[in-house]
Image: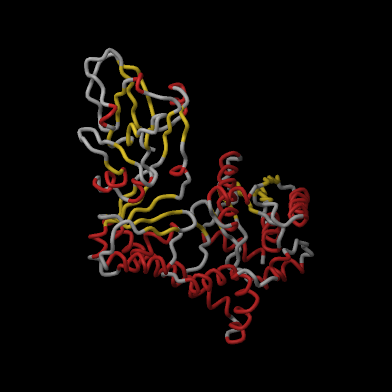
Amino acid sequence: MLNEFQSHIHKSGLFKKEDKLLLAVSGGLDSTVLCHLLKLGGYQVVLAHCNFKLRGKDSEADEKFCKAIGKKLSFKTEVKHFDVKSYCKKHKVSVQVAARNLRYEWFAHLLKKEKLDYILTAHQANDSIETILLNLMRGTGINGIKGIQAKNGKIVRPLLPFTRREITEFAAKNKITFREDKSNSSDTYDRNFIRLHIIPRLKELNPKLENTFMDNAAHFAEEAGIVNDYLESRAAELLIQTHDSVFINKKKLKNEPYQSSLINFMISGYGFNTTQQKNILQNLNNNSISGKLFHSETHRLTIDRNDLVIKLNSEDHTKAVKINSLEDLKRIKTLRFSEESKFSVPAHNELLLDPSTLIFPLDFRPKKTGDKFKPFGMKGFKLVSDFLKDQKLNAFQKENCRLLVNGNGDIIWIAGYRSDERYKVDKSASSFLKLKFIES
């Protein structure tokens, strides 16, 4: 197996002998065998073990075991503990998503810190088969049936050509001990159910199932490259990306002949499943009312008047800030203030105030149901929600609006949009307070 392993690395151009490698090690069969193969091959390796503290004493035993592997094989071993539950709560994601995000953020940090070239993971042929079946079960395009790729940027998976059986036999022949994860024997998780029940039945029909799947995956990967070239060229015509949002032109998308494939290509990476994609297209083609929202674990999508708009999930839009003094304004990242001695016409994102009209504490907060103000230049009051509707803002823009509210409850300013008529300044005054709204 060692010769085949090294031949695969060389022929596939995964990495070179002089490259410095970071290996993600759990203590399980696959990563432990990969440790030994890399040692036998004479590669330069740093081990990285993540302790997510989700399995009690077993998590601590895994960490101890991985440190022992590093010591035995003379590999430097890095270990980090993670608070996965807090991350899940803060970012509103599943344990699996949280663990993946935390793991790869740390790996990227280690890559830079240790001046390493690649991150290695121990995925093997059966993992790729399970991934294909999971994707087919949940709904996917051609990218979902090409399996796990051997190399994706800095991430390399050198064990992919080998089956679980081959790896197990190598471990037994070389007397390699490893840790058994008890959860692998439970079919509670979808992947385990496929591993324990579906694949054994499929192998009854095709004893060479792994070879068949890997051959097919190679064909699909090649064909996916052709399809992706087309989809990328079409997406470039439809999609605009800013620092915090993605805009997909509705009119152009409606004229595309392969809407379903395009929408999958453009939004599946943001966590939107096939059922949501169908609903999005249905709303799009039925000219449904704008403002419809869809949520994935990591992102939100709204159907606006002209675009589909995607943004990262965030709790920032729900936060209100209490301002007890002018000094407190310095801690609000989106507001800047200065004292002016001469009147000048404020820009659209600026507000001129008479400092004597302020009653502390002020509130800088999102809008609430029933909020009213007297828009600058108007005599009567208007609901904030109606004003924002007239401005033709999308759901995210409305959600991110901030109101500056005086201590007496008056709405002084819808930041970046309109001030209140009651707080109009006297142009002949000798002092003004200028606020500037910096959009995040």
Viewer-side residue, 342 vs 88: 342
The C terminus lies in quadrant:
top left
Q: Is residue 388 visible?
A: yes
Name, please, the residue furthest toward the bottom: 205
On the rendered structure, is 350 left or right of 14? left
Q: Is residue 269 above or below residue 338?
A: below
353 relative to 379, above or below? above
Residue 322 shown left or right of residue 397 in the figure: right
Q: Is 241 on the left-hand or right-hand side of 180?
A: left
Image: 145 above or below 351: below
Comparing 51 with 347, the one in front is 347
Indicate the quadrant containing the N terminus: top left, top right, bottom left or bottom right.
bottom right
Residue under the point 22% across and 18% down: 427
Q: Quick check: can you spot residue 236?
A: no
Image location (x, y in percent) of residue 85 = 63, 51
Quadrant in the rendering for residue 250: bottom left
Q: Position of residue 87 (x, y in %)?
A: 58, 48
Residue 126, horizontal then vertical, whole percent: 60, 71
| Quadrant of the rendered image containing residue 27 | bottom right
- Answer above or below: position of 403 versus 19: above
In front of the other: 68 or 11? 68
Residue 95 image point, x, y percent: 60, 57
Residue at point 58%, 40% (across, down): 115
Out of 145 and 221, give the one closest to the viewer.
145
Q: Residue at x 44, y 71 (%)?
A: 220
Q: How many marks?
A: 0
> Is 238 displayed left or right of 121 in the figure?
left
Name which quarter of the figure residue 330 lies in: top left
